[in-house]
Amino acid sequence: QVQLVESGGGLVQAGGSLRLSCAAAGLTFSSRTMGWFRQAPGKEHESVAVIHRGGGITSYADSVQGRFIISRDNAKSTLYLQMNSLKPEDTAVYYCAAGYSDTYSREPEKYEYWGQGIQVTVSS
């Protein structure tokens, strides 16, 4: 049974930082592209950042480029998202997702497994 469990969300003031983690189990983590997505109330699902299975290739949404950093520890089967200089518009439920094997994409339909999501709220 595949499990992706996010942690590290919460409430933070604008300009602050948070670090999200996603612990994976039941899949070969090191063979999967991993991604962070988010969904704010009334908005569509948005790709935030993705990282290739080896960790050497990353891609970010324009809205978070330069503020967020995605990383992974394949030995620990854990994905991270360091979020700095947070803005109120970053408020959303953040999801960790595992891509289908041998794919690298930011399209949600290319992701096979999803976590339950975690709330991030940035106050102004």
Image: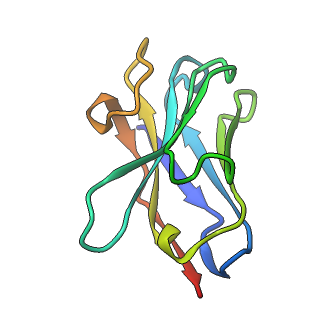
Image x and y of residue 91, in percent: 48, 73
Between 5 and 99, the one nearer to me in the picture: 99
Describe residue 64's horizontal placement relative to residue 41 as left or right: right
Between 99 and 1, the one nearer to me in the picture: 99
Above-or-below relation of 41 to 107: below
Give the position of the N terminus as an image quadrant.
top left
Residue furthest bottom in the image: 124
Image x and y of residue 12, in percent: 66, 80
Above-or-below relation of 113 to 68: above
Name the residue at 43% across, 11% down. 102
Image x and y of residue 99, in percent: 41, 28
How many marks on residues?
0
Describe residue 13's horizontal placement relative to residue 95 as left or right: right
Describe residue 118's horizontal placement relative to residue 116 as left or right: right
Give the position of the C terminus as an image quadrant.
bottom right
Above-or-below relation of 97 to 111: below
Residue furthest top in the image: 102
Name the residue at 48% across, 71% down. 89
Name the residue at 60% across, 69% down. 9
Image x and y of residue 28, in percent: 54, 22
Between 55 and 47, the one nearer to me in the picture: 47
The colour scheme used here is: rainbow
Name the residue at 41% across, 16% down. 103
